[in-house]
Image (cartoon, rainbow, N blue to C red):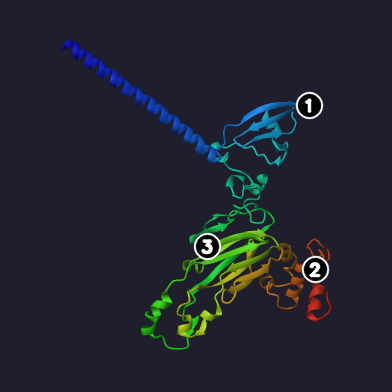
Amino acid sequence: MVASSKKNSKEEEEATRAEEEKLIVGKEEIKRKDEEKEEEEEEANGADEEMVVEKYPEDSYSFLSIHGPREPLFSAETDTFDISSSFDESWVSSSGSPLEMYFFESEHKEYYCKLKVGDGVCDDIFNKIEYQYDGGDCCSDTCAGSSCGIGGLKNAFYGYVSGDGFPDCQRPGTVPISIKLNNITSSRDPELLVFSDDWLVEFMGIAEDEWRAESPDNLHFSLDCDGKNVFAVYVEKEMAGQRETMRVRDGANCTLVTRRIPEEIIGTQSTFDVFDKYPIWSIDYTITNLYIKSNREMEIEISSEHNKGKERENFKLIPTCYFDKLQDHTNLSSIYPAVGPSNEAIDWLVDNDEQNSECEDENFIERYALASMFFAMNLSEEL
């Protein structure tokens, strides 16, 4: 009985030990798989590995190479192994393509090493002149790539909506313009739609007030300048009275785009003609050019429009230097509407293809005065 008991006890111990070994092996296997998974995720997310600096002799010259997770980068020829000596030298990829290399000290190395200049995403740390404003990523006119401005607006129109845009653009050569949504109402509002006949509930199946109160879908609203999108949002009723300011290239050609309200759903209409038509948000807006001089800001109205029967508003920004030159010769607050000889002269100077109406021209004021006289005399010949 004793021998049998000891034998059973030994077998139990061996079985227990075998189970423990399986558990240990299993835990190690799980840990190994977890580590492999983390490495795969880091590679997929483009996480940077620790960079290794190597020295390459070639034709009696020395080169520095930085190996990251993507490809080696090569410096210009150097006589030292100290990478700091190559800060200002040119760098190229393994294929010989020129590269912009930036070196900086930061407490957040792991975070910033994942960022990239010129990838279409504006990074605050690089939005400085020494990094060419993140390689152009932070302004619409200099950004390149499919990611430009996507999701860039987080609190547009005073926090009412998100969308695409470049809220952090601060590059010299850009100017601020503002768009204010003065009023937003439904196309079924009694001030926009009047019935020529009586509303018959028994035929419509809904009361007139309920029908008029149905909310339209949010309205797409965007601005393009020089063929590039500056911002894009969807308008909601709560945005009425709010404005958004953005920076675009000085002198840019711009187009504001929204959905047009068809003439057949507003004005005086038959109930049966409009009953099954979807409502659309009716918006009137004002575009202004913000002119800043000696810390004084002046709003110069470019246009006030409505999306009734119109879905595009085209305008060209008057270069800021025109304001500087002409502020003593014309009323800047009404410089945009092309009404009157003075405004026509400015339009002609801005659109002149001969490239001799720029502000640097010492005869700029004289040209403006002669053009104003020409349009005042209603001459038919070309200027």
In space, the residues marked 3 and 2 are separated at their CA atoms by: 39 Å
Q: Which residue is mark 2?
A: 365
Q: State how far apart marks 2 and 1 are (Cα).
A: 61 Å
Q: Secondary structure at mark 2?
A: helix
Residue 368 at least partly seen: yes
Could you say which is closer to the camera, residue 10 or residue 93?
10
Instruction: List the residue tagged with mark 1.
Output: 59
Could you tell me which residue is drawn at 59 percent across and 70 percent down? Answer: 286
| Camera-nearest label, 3 or 2 | 3
Mark 3 / mark 1, whichever is N-terminal: 1
Say which label, 3 or 2, has the lower sequence index.
3
Discs 3, 1 touching: Cβ within 8 Å: no
Within 10 Å of disc 3 (Cα), the crowding (few <14, some 14-19, many 20+) is many
- Circle nearer the viewer, 3 or 1: 1
Residue 265 drawn at (x, y percent)? 51, 79
Per the image, the residue denoted by label 3 is 157
Which residue is drawn at the image coordinates 19% and 13% (left, top)?
Answer: 4
Q: Is residue 295 above or below residue 44?
A: below
Tell me: residue 5, above or below residue 273: above
Q: CA distance from mark 3 to mark 1?
A: 60 Å
Label 1, secondary structure: give it: loop
- Labels 3 and 2 touching (C-beta < 8 A): no
**As drawn, which residue projects farthest toward the bottom?**
197
Q: Which residue is nearer to you in this view: 109 or 229? A: 229
Answer few, some or many: residues within 10 Å of disc 2's Cα (few below 14, many 20 plus, some between 14 and 19): some
At horizontal 64% and vertical 66% (from top left) the residue drawn is: 255
Identify residue type, mark 2. Answer: Ile
Percent across and percent down for residue 282 are: 52, 74
